[in-house]
Amino acid sequence: MFRGHIRRSGSLRSVWHRRERKRRPLDTLPAEPVVQPQPVRPKYVPTEAKWLSGEPGKMLRCFVRLAAERGTAFHLSHRAIQRKFRLFYCACCRSRWGVLPVLAQQVVETVERYADGQVNAKQLRTARRTAETVAHPVPHADGYNPAAWEVTNAVRLVVAAATVHVRLRLGSVSSAWPVSAAEQVVLLRELFGNPFHPISVEPSWLTPTVLTLAHIVRTERTFELMPVLGDALQDAGCDNAEVIDHCYGPSPHVVGCWLVDSLSGW
């Protein structure tokens, strides 16, 4: 009969929770996990010592970083840098010319014409697709044929020449293996010179004779005329020892030679 005067305190579960809250503090938020700081990788600094190291991997990385950091202050534009890298891979392909299939040789010639503005981007993409379908090694019972691997590695250089713009955007320009390191170093110095000490062409050197010879050498690949070009430069008043030595030197000349390009306005 006293039910109406009894104060209900809730269910047994709620009573137990209230008692437990008096005994222990309220639950706090879980502690945030401690995040260990990642080690900071030192910034890659291009130096002249790395360029002169004689290692093509270091030279290529040094040149790419140097061009990216200095931007328009660099002595070559972005388009000219792409052209130089294309011609570098093409020159490496020509050093393996006897190994390349005919289709791959035609792709190399197309890439070279594209570098000089004679072929459009659509034709370059078609050439790249052609190079990607050439000479895949076929396994035999005794394994892969070494000659097929040699052809495949040479064709990879052709594909690299056609995809330089993508490689530069990703910063993944690699050395031109399987061409020897010594050959690559010679070609890099022939194409780029010394990027830390670029040689500026004096306007007085650009006589009609010099311009005509530079154009003939560049378009017709008559590099045997380089000593004649050296004579014309001396007649024009050029006294730069590095320029004269490059004309008369024994180093092989290829399309994209830094001196011929400078005289031609590339």
Image (cartoon, rainbow, N blue to C red):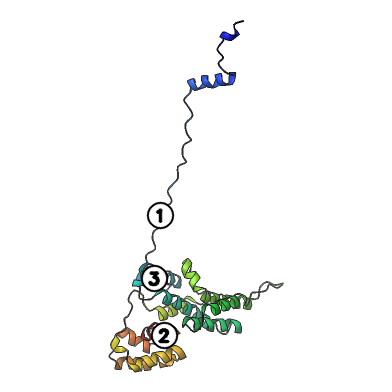
Residue at coordinates 55% horizontally, 18% vertically from top-left? 15
Q: Which mark is residue 161?
A: none
Q: Are marks 3 and 1 in contact (CB under 8 Å)?
A: no
Sequence order check, earlier mark of 3 and 2:
3
Camera-nearest label, 3 or 2: 3
* Residue at point 41%, 83% (across, down): 257
x, y percent for residue 205: 30, 89
Residue position marked by numbered label 3 in the rendering: 67
Residue at numbered disc 2: 251
User: Element under label 1?
Assistant: loop
Badge 2 crowding class, 10 Å Cα cut-off, few under 14, some 14 to 19, many 20 or more, is few
Split into 4 quadrants, where in the image is the N terminus?
A: top right
Does label 1 or label 2 sit earlier along the sequence?
1
**Residue at x-position 60% and y-position 8%:** 3
Question: Secondary structure beneath disc 2?
Answer: loop
Q: Nearer the viewer, mark 3 or mark 1?
A: 3
Three-letter code, disc 3: Ala
The amino acid beneath tag 2 is: Ser
Mark toward the viewer: 1 or 2 = 1
Q: Which of marks 1 and 3 precedes in the sequence?
A: 1
The image quadrant where one finds the C terminus is bottom left
The residue tagged 1 is: 40
Q: Residues within 10 Å of mark 3 (few under 14, many from 20)?
A: many
